[in-house]
Image: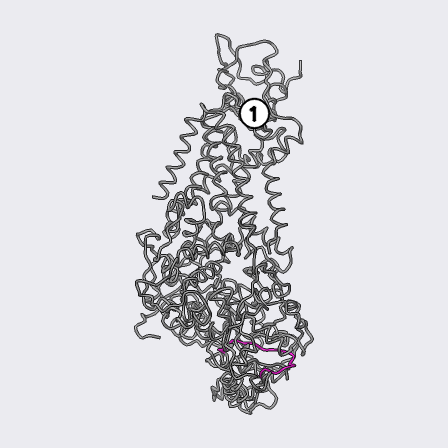
Amino acid sequence: MSSDMPKPEELARVSFQPPESDWMDTPVQFKSGTYNFPAAKKNVEYLKMPNPHAWAVDDKDWMLGDKWKEKILDGISDRLQKFRSFSLFMDICVRCGACADKCHFFMGSGDPKNMPVLRAELLRSIYRKNFTVAGKLLGSLAGGRELTEDVIKEWYYYFYQCTECRRCSVFCPYGIDTAEITMIGRELLYELGLGINWALEPAANCFRTGNHLGLQPHTFKDNIEFVVDELETATGINAMPSFNRKGAEILFITPSADVFAEPAIYTLMGYLLLFKYLDLDVTFSSYASEGGNFGLFTSHDTIKSLNAKMYHEAERLGVKWILGGECGHMWRVVHQYMDTLNGPANHLEVPRSPITGTVFENTRSTKMVHICEFTADLIKHNKLKLDPRRNRKVIPTFHDSCNPARALGLFEEPRYILRNVCEQFYEMPENTIREQTFCCAGGAGLGNDENMEMRLRGGLPRGNAVSYVRDKHGVNMLACICAIDKATLPPLVEYWAPGVGVCGVHELLGNALIMPGESEERKAGKINLRAEEDDDESEGGGDV
Amino acid sequence: MYDAGKIVLGLAVFVGVSAFPIWYNIAAGKGAYAVQLEPPPNGTKQCVAETANGYMRAEHMHILDEWRNMVVRDGKRPKVTVDGVHYDYSLSKTCMNCHSNKEKFCDSCHTPAGVAPACWDCHVAPEDK
Amino acid sequence: MKAVSALVAVIVLFAIAYMVGPSAKFVFGVAVPYAAMAVFLGGIIYRVAFKWGKAPVPFAIATTCGQQKSLPWIKHASLENPSTTGGVILRMAFEVLTFRSLFRNTRVAVKDGPRVTYDGEWVLWAAAMLFHWSFLVIVLRHMRFFTEPVPFFVPLLQAVDGFFEIGIPALYLTGVGLLLAASVLFLRRMLDAQVRYISLMADYFPLFLVMGIAITGILMRHFMKTDIVSVKEMATGLATFKPVVPDGVGPIFFAHMFLVCVLLAYFPFSKLTHMAGVFMSPTRNLRCNSREVRHINPWNHPVRVHTYAEYEDEFRDKMIACGLPVDKKETEEPKKAKAGEKKVDD
C-alpha cells in the first residue's frame, strides 16, 4: 500500500453532497489511485479484439478509431436484441434511488456516479438519445445526451468502478442488475479497444496457458509441488496430487491463485489434505488450470472461450464429474453460464460422492460440484475426523463472496464447515452478510495496486463490519471462499480492521483434519498449515 | 429463452383486464346507460331549491344532510319557504311527497352511479301509490 | 428546474383541457380518450412483445437472495432462491404485490470512527405501496362509470374506501392516499440530495400528472361538482362504442379526463412501463436451478477457443520434461501450431 494513503478516519470522512452542476455537465476526473490502467495493446491483439492500440488514461485523445460512434451505437443495438436484461433495464428504471447507498463504492467515495442508478444512467442517457422517440425529439429534456468522447471516458472510469457484485440488484424493486449494464458497457468499450489490463492480461494468459498468471505447464506443476513440500514440512504428510491423469473419477479445478499466492496456497493445502485423507480419485489439470474466468470481466464471448476448457478437459481425461474449488466469480460462471454456453456435458455423469454416495441432484445438468457442498456432505455423514481445538486460536467470521452469495445462494455449506472445524464462529452484522454481503471492492478486475484508493474506499463497509466483530467478539480471522477475496481482503483488513487475517474455509478444515500419519507436532495442535508454531502450553495440546 | 408463450399469455390477461368495461357491458347486455328521471307523478313543478343547471343533482345530498342534522341531531324542524309555500325539513313528507317513487327517481341515478345513500338506513321508502 | 418544467407542462395540459374541453366536447370526450387507450394498449404490447420479448434471456442470471437448494438436510429458501416454477410465481407475487425487494431498503450513514450504520428505511416502500394500491383501488372504483350494472366489487371497495364517512359524499381514503403518497415521493425527490441529483424531468412529470389527476378528482367529488350521471352516460358510451357527449359535464371533468388520457398515452414510452417490465425481469423471474436444468441461449454462437491439442503443441517439450502426461509423444511436424488460430465450434 502506498504510504501517502490517508488515515482510515480521514478516508472515511466521505461527503455525500452531490456537485452543484448537473451530472450530465460534470466531466469525469481521473484521480490517481482511483482508476485502472488500460489494457496493453498486445493483450487486445492476442485476444483478437477490435482496435488494439497503445494509449493512456491521461491522453487527451484516446484514439477511438474510425466511425467509433457508429460502432458504439451498433453495439448497443446489437445487444438490445440479444439481452432482454439490457433491453429491459434501459427502460424500466424509475430512479427511486433505493440502490444508491447499496453500492460499496458510493458509500466509500460519495461520488454520485457511483450510485448504481447513475452508473446505469451513463449508458441509459445515450440509449434514450439514440433509440427512443422521446429522446430523439426532446433530447436532454427526456434524459438523453450526445455521445461524445467524454462520455466514453466517463464510461471507462465508472464501468470499471463497479465490481459487478450485484448487491444493488437485491434491493431494486425491478431487480435491475448493474452487473448486466457494466458487463455490456465494458463490451462496448472493447469495441473501441478500451479495457483494463488487470482483467485483460489474465484473460489472455488464461487463453494461452490455462491460468491467469500465464504459468506454463511445468511451472504450474512446480508451484503445486512447492506447496506440497511446504505442506509436508507443516504436517509430515506428502499429499502430492496427480496431473492431467486420464481415467480419474474427478477433475478438480480451482483458481490458479491457490497454487501461488498467499494465503490462497493454504486453502490448496486444505484441499490436498482432504483428497489424501479420502484417497479421492481426483486429478488436477495444467490445461484447465484456472477456475476463475476473467472473461466475466471482459465480454460474454470471452467467458465462453475461457470456460470451454473445463468441459473440454473433462471430456479428454474421461472423468465422471468436476469438483470446483473456492472461488467467487468462477462459480457465477459455472452456475449461471457454463452449461448454457458450453454444455450439455453429456460426456459426464451426475456427480456422486464416492465417499458418502450422495448424488448432487442440484448439479444434475452442469455436473460440477462446489467443494463446500462436497465437504459439508462429508462432515454431515461423519466421514471426517475433525479436531476443532487445532483452530482454537482462530476466531473466524465468514465473508460471503458476492457471487456464491447472489448467484448461487451458497450460504449454509461454508458456515456448516466452519462451525465443525472451529470452536467459535461469529457473524458480521446482518446488513453485511449473506445476500446483503459487501464486496471486497477488488473483484471484476479492479484488484490492482494502481486502483488502491478506490479499493480501500469501496472496502469501507466490509472492513467496518470486520472491525465491528473484531472489537465485539475478538474475531481475528476473515474466512472466505473466493480467490480474489484472498488477494484483495488482506490489504483491506490491514487498513480498516488491523489484526484480522484472511483465510479460506478449507484452510481451517485442513488444520482440523486428523490425518493418519501426521506429525506429532500437528497431532498436538502445535502447528498449523501456515507452519505457525504454537508453543503456548497453557492452552494444552489437541488431544485426539 | 424467449418465453413467448408466457409473454402472450401475460399480454392477453393484460388486454383482457383492460377491456373489462367492454366485455362486461356486452355480457350484461344493457348497452349504453342513459339517465331517465321520473318527473313528480303529482305534476308539481316547484322544488325546494333550484333545479336548473344540475344544481339539485349536485347538491341535494348536502341539503338532505343539513336537514337531517337539524332535525335528528339538533331536534329542530324548521321550514324552507319557496314562493310563499312552506316546506318541512323532511325527506318523507317533503321530498317524497312529490318524488314518490324511490325506484324511478332516487334509484335511477344512485344505482347506476354506484351510490348507496344512508337515507334508507332509517327511512322506509313510501309504498308505491 | 426540471421539476418546474414538469409542473408547468402539467399545468398547461390542465389549462388546455379546462378551457378548450367544454367547447370541443367530441375531441376531449371521445377522440382523445379512444386515441389514448389505443396508444396505451398498443404501446404496451409493442414494448413487451416486440421490444423486450424479441430479445431472449440468454443466461440464467437470477439474483439469489437466500439459501440454494443443494443438500437435502440444508434448509432451502424456496421463496428467495426458488428452484421450481411455483417458487418463482410466489417470489414474483411478493415482488409485484408487496414490493418485497424495496422492503429490504436501508439507509446507510458513515459516521466518525469510522462507523457504518444501516437503518431501516421504510418511507419509500410505504409511499410506493400506498401510491400503487391506492391507484389500483381508484381505477377499480371508477368502473362504476364504465359499466352498467355496477359490478359487485365496486360497492365493496367504496364501502371500505369511504369507511370513515367523512363528509357527504364520503371522502375516499385512496384519493387522499394517492395524493399523499405522490406528495411524499415528490418531496423525497426534492429533499434528498442524492435522489434530486439523479432525477430527470421524466421523473417529476408523471408525479405531477398523477397529482393533477387526484386533485381534479377530489375537487370534482367534493367541491366543483359535475353531473356524474352525464359522466356515466359518456363513459358507458365509450365502453360500448356508442360515444355520446351529454351536456352538464363541467370543465373540471374534461381536465381530469384529459390528464388521465395523457398518462395513458405517456405510459408505454416512459419509465412507467415498469408496470409490465417488473414481470419480465430475469433476475427475479427465473428458477435458480441453473446447474440442475440447462438454460438455453438461442444465439449461443461459436467463439475462438484454445484447444488442448493446441496447448499441448505449444508446450509439449516442457510437459514431457517435467513429467506431465501428453497425448502425442512428439510433435508430428516441427512447426508449432499457432495458439488460438483455429475457430472451433464446440
- Residue lying furthest top: B84
Q: Secondary structure at mark 1?
A: helix
Name the chain letter of the residue that bears numbered label 1.
Answer: C
Q: Is residue A257 visible?
A: yes
Vertical order, B47 against A398 (above or below): above
Residue A206 image position (x, y, % from top left)? 49, 74
Residue B103 is covered by the magenta coloring? no
Vertical order, C319 against C257 (above or below): below
Residue A384 image position (x, y, % from top left)? 63, 80
Q: Residues within 10 Å of mark 1 (few under 14, many from 20)?
A: many
Amino acid type at circle 1 is: Glu
Please name the residue shown 69% across and 75% down the image: A357
- Residue A116 left/right relative to A359: left
- Residue bearing mark 1: C233
Vertical order, A228 against C30 (above or below): below
Residue span colored magenta: A242-257
Q: Depth check: B110 or A266 in front? A: A266
Residue C342 image position (x, y, % from top left)? 53, 72
Q: Depth check: A112 or C241 in front? A: C241
Which quadrant is home to the N terminus of chain C? top left
Vertical order, A48 against C23 (above or below): below
Q: Depth check: C13 or A358 in front? A: C13
Q: How is the image coloured?
A: one colour
Query: How many numbered callouts?
Result: 1
Q: Depth check: C149 or A348 in front? A: A348
Residue C2 image position (x, y, % from top left)? 36, 44
